[in-house]
Amino acid sequence: QNWFDNQKAEHMAVRTGAGLFDMTSFGKIRIEGRDACAYLNRISSAQIDVAAGRIVYTMFLNDRGGIEADLTVTRLSETAYLAVVPGATLQRNLAWMRANVGDDFAVITDVTAAESVLCLMGPQARDVLSRVIFGARVSILFALMLTVISALIGIAAGALQGYYGGWVDL
């Protein structure tokens, strides 16, 4: 079957506008504990000691400098992080992380089944989101909207914003 034209149209729509992607199949790993930051900095190619809410694109490296994982790590709080890895490598990544925690006090937990990920991507994503929440300042009202939705349906919700040139706060 020729699917190229459909794929091209979707690609161009997101590249020039916006698109919503369900990325729930990606693996989600919580890393928590007093040494979580030191542990992640030891195994990561990038600096992980960033402000809460920041996303870092990085790789996990073995002792020889070889790549063990290609992922993003989000700092949730002073002692908690969320790593997002490809779904196909989740079990391998978990095993490698647990085998390399060493003496660091860090708890590694697979939270994949408990969390969903929807990504609104493209240069018009902020505009689309601002129309959805009635044109108010996206950062403030979106945080309020997530709080209200969380209270109504009884689940925790959060949002982070990123772009290919780096990561910024929402």
Image: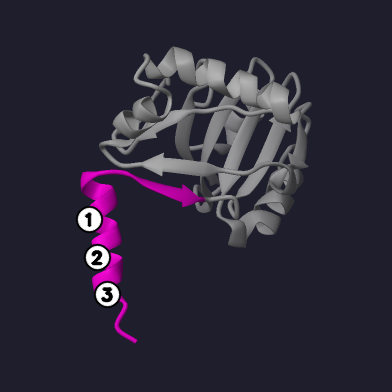
- Mark 3 burial class by Cα count in 10 Å: few <14, some 14-19, many 20+: few
Question: Which residue, given by chain and number where applicable, does mark 3 sit on?
Answer: 4
Between 69 and 141, which is closer to the camera in this rendering?
141
In the image, which residues are magenta? 1-22
* Percent x, y of residue 155: 73, 30
- Per the model, the C-alpha gap separating discs 3 and 2 is 6 Å
- Per the model, the C-alpha gap separating discs 1 and 2 is 6 Å
- Per the model, the C-alpha gap separating discs 3 and 1 is 12 Å
Residue 20 colored in magenta in the image: yes
Tag 1 and tag 2, C-beta contact below 8 Å: yes
Between 12 and 102, which is closer to the camera in this rendering?
12
Which type of secondary structure does the marked residue at label 1 adopt? helix
Looking at the image, tell me whether mark 3 or mark 1 is earlier in sequence order: 3
Residue 28 colored in magenta in the image: no
Tell me: 157 left or right of 130.
right
Q: In which quarter of the image is residue 9?
A: bottom left
Tag 3 and tag 2, C-beta contact below 8 Å: yes
Which type of secondary structure does the marked residue at label 2 adopt? helix
Tell me: 129 left or right of 85.
left
Residue for point 34% across, 87% down: 1
Q: Quadrant of residue 139?
A: top left
Q: Which mark identifies residue 12?
A: 1
**Residue type indicated by callout 2:** Lys
- Mark 1 burial class by Cα count in 10 Å: few <14, some 14-19, many 20+: few
Q: Which mark identifies residue 8?
A: 2
**Residue type indicated by callout 3:** Phe
